[in-house]
Image (cartoon, helix red, strand yellow):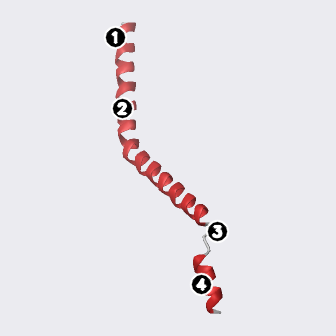
Amino acid sequence: MIDFIKSFRADEDGAVTVDWVVLTAAVVGMAVLTYAALAENTQAVTNATGAAVLTAEDFLTN
């Protein structure tokens, strides 16, 4: 039984998969945080742009 535990502890099969999963989760987490940080500001810029277009449209049609 002790030999089994030692061989299990020394076995490195699947380590690359675990690293890949951890790195992928980190990238996804960073993408979610970036989206959360930018979403409000993006909406504000979109609203300001829409207001500017409507103002210019009113100016050009009159």
Q: Residue at x 62, y 74 (%)?
A: 11
Question: Is there a contact, CB below 8 Å, between mark 1 and mark 4?
Answer: no
Mark number for residue 45? Answer: 2
- Chain-order first, disc 2 or disc 1: 2
| Residue named by callout 4 | 6
Residue located beneath label 3 in the image? 13
Where is residue 29? Give x, y as percent.
Answer: 46, 55
Q: Nearer the viewer, mark 2 or mark 1?
A: 2
Q: Tell which of 60 and 8 is nearer to you.
A: 8
Q: Earlier in the sequence, mark 2 or mark 3?
A: 3
Above or below — where is 1 with respect to 39?
below
The foreground one among 23 and 51 is 23
At horizontal 63% and vertical 66% (from top left) the residue drawn is 14
Give the Cα separation between the discs numbered 4 and 2: 60 Å
| Residue carrying label 1 | 59
Q: CA distance from mark 2 to mark 1?
A: 21 Å
Q: Which circle, 4 or 2, is nearer the viewer?
A: 4
Residue 44 location, x and y as percent?
Answer: 35, 35
Three-letter residue code for mark 3: Asp
Position of 4 relative to 20 (above/below):
below
Task: Identify the amino acid type marked 1.
Answer: Phe
Q: Position of residue 24 (x, y in %)?
A: 54, 55
Disc 4 residue type (three-letter): Lys
Dot 2 amino acid type:
Val
Q: Tell me, yes or no, whether the two marked residues, 3 and 4, touch with CB atoms within 8 Å.
A: no
- Which secondary structure, mark 2? helix
